[in-house]
Image (tube, grey):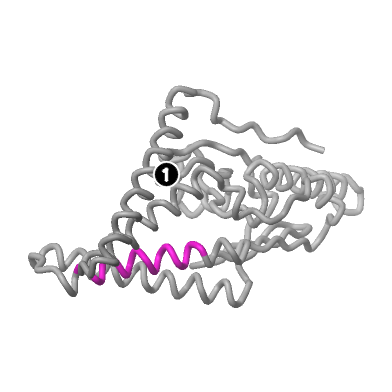
């Protein structure tokens, strides 16, 4: 069994505290404006609905930043799931998470659309906001469809793993991966599972990811687990698969 992955979040405690205070402040301010927006709706003000929607989205986002475990549904440990090796083992993204983000995306797109339809905006702002509204509204539909199909998943097998995400899918061999590590990226993305994929390196498309997170590949979705639990499971599964590969290649008839 591999050691639990190291989480690189202890390097700047003051910064983390400031980020946490900022999120709590955002939540408090957003809730205050939601209350004011509700009052505007009650008084018949035209801007009441978009104000309430926008700051409701901000409040919901802050809540998910403070309590991410609200959208995690699987409490199993890596050791428990490793018993399923060589698989296949399929972990699915929580439907609730997809639905929440679908609502957030729809709300944000709706606010932008309201601004475009009710405000006299200059042509440049309209040129920028129309694609934004389309992106968020189409994203909401896509998330809703994925939640209905329940096919956003991570599938672990003997030779590698397959990710099926909202927009795309990918198959990766264990032989091509490095160890999986949990890192802290920014205030907006507190944690991310990162690793190196030799196939990405060979394709020459690793530059941006490596510059941002230090590795050429990452997993943003945790499929119902915590970042630490998923990274531990991936490392343990990878280690067992590579150990079996090493044993296989040492057999005389396989040389």
60 left or right of 172 in image: left
Q: Residue at x 51, y 73 (%)?
A: 144
Can you see residue 4?
A: yes
Give the image location of residue 180, x and y in percent.
64, 42
Q: Quadrant of residue 232?
A: top right
113 or 38, which is in the foreground? 38
Residue at the image point whose x is 51% and y is 23% from the top: 11
Residue 23 point in image, percent of width and height? 42, 40
* Secondary element type, mark 1: loop
The quadrant in which residue 35 appears is bottom left
User: Residue at point 45% right, 67% down?
Assistant: 103
* Residue 178 sits above or below residue 142 on the image: above
179 on left or right of 3: left
Spot occupied by residue 243 in the image (x, y as percentages of width and height)? 82, 44
Which image quarter holds the N terminus?
Answer: top right
Residue 96 rendering spot, x and y as whole percentages: 59, 64
Give the residue at x 78% y 46%.
Answer: 77
Residue to which mark 1 is pinned = 188
The residue stretch that appears in magenta: 100-115
């Amino acid at each position: 069994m591999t050691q639990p992955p190291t989480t690189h979040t202890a390097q700047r405690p003051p910064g983390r505290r400031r980020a946490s205070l900022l999120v709590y402040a955002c939540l408090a301010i957003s809730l205050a404006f939601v209350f004011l927006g509700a009052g505007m709706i009650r008084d018949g003000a035209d801007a009441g609905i978009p104000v309430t929607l926008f700051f409701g989205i901000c409040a919901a986002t802050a809540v998910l930043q403070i309590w991410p475990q609200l959208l995690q549904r699987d409490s199993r440990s890596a050791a428990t799931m490793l018993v399923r090796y060589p698989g296949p083992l399929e972990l699915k993204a929580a439907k609730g998470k997809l639905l929440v983000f679908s609502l957030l995306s729809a709300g944000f797109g709706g606010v932008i659309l309201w601004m475009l339809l009710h405000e006299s905006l200059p042509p440049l702002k309209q040129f920028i906001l129309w694609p934004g509204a389309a992106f968020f509204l189409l994203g909401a539909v896509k998330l809703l469809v994925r939640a209905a199909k329940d096919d956003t998943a991570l599938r672990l097998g003997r030779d590698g793993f397959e990710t099926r995400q909202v927009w795309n899918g990918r198959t990766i061999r264990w032989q091509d991966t490095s160890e999986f590590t949990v890192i802290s990226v920014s205030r907006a993305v507190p944690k991310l599972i990162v690793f190196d994929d030799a196939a990405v390196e060979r394709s020459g498309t690793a530059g941006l990811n490596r510059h941002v997170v230090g590795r050429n590949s990452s997993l943003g979705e945790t499929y119902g687990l915590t970042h630490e639990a998923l990274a531990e499971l991936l490392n343990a599964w990878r280690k067992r698969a590579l150990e079996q590969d090493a044993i296989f290649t040492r057999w005389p008839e396989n040389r």
